[in-house]
Image: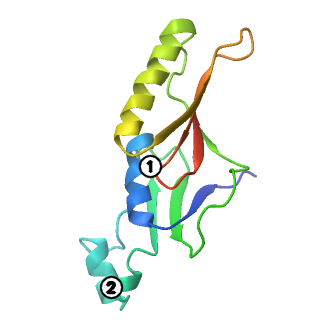
Amino acid sequence: MSREVQVTFDCADPAALADFWAQVLGYRLQDPPPGFDSWEAALEALGVPPENRNDASALVDPDGRGPRVFFQRVPEGKTAKNRVHLDVRAAPGLAGDERIAALEKECERLVGLGGRRLERHEPAPPMAGGHIVMADPEGNEFCLD
């Protein structure tokens, strides 16, 4: 039997990081609980103090295929390279110059959203089509693949 998977990011600002990743992945903010028009209303009704209302955020795939992505505030900052990272499939089915051009275009868009370009790995046929290593606004590495 397979299991559902949730990807969790420890971070300093869950709302801001959720916004960045929603735009990267084409996901949307998870709806508030039934009976509430907004998360602010739900958190108010649940008695969550204002200073704790950005302790967590979550994204869902609007098509229902991908994993839920959860962001939780932690007190410590990022201190080392990720051992696990996301590969964002930005050029599926493309090869050669067309693939690299698509990756560069997406990289430029994500830099405009607050991401950082770290390095580009050139194609090495037949096994590697090339990719771009990036970091989100809090420094978490990911690849445009």
Give the structural element (helix, strand or loop) at label 1.
helix
Closer-to-camera residue (103/90) = 103
Q: Position of residue 45 (x, y in %)?
A: 30, 88
Closer-to-camera residue (40/109) = 109
Q: Is residue 125 left or right of residue 65?
A: right
Question: In terms of sequence position, does the residue under pointer 1 or pointer 2 come before the other?
Answer: 1
Asked which quadrant contains residue 133, the reply is top right
- From this view, report whether residue 101 is shown above or below residue 27: above
Q: Position of residue 68 (x, y in %)?
A: 52, 55
Q: Position of residue 64 (x, y in %)?
A: 47, 47
Residue hosting label 1: 21
- From this view, report whether residue 56 is shown above or below residue 123: below
**What's the distance in space between the residues labelled 1 and 2, CA to CA?**
24 Å
Farthest residue, direction left: 37
Q: Is residue 6 left or right of residue 111?
A: right
Asked which quadrant contains residue 111, the reply is top left
**In contact (CB < 8 Å): disc 1 and disc 2:** no
Q: Residues within 10 Å of mark 1 (few under 14, many from 20)?
A: some
Q: Disc 2 residue type?
A: Pro
Residue hosting label 2: 50
Q: Position of residue 113 (x, y in %)?
A: 36, 43
Look at 37% across and 44% down and name the residue there. 23
Can residue 35 be seen from the camera position used here? no
Look at 44% across and 66% down and name the residue there. 13
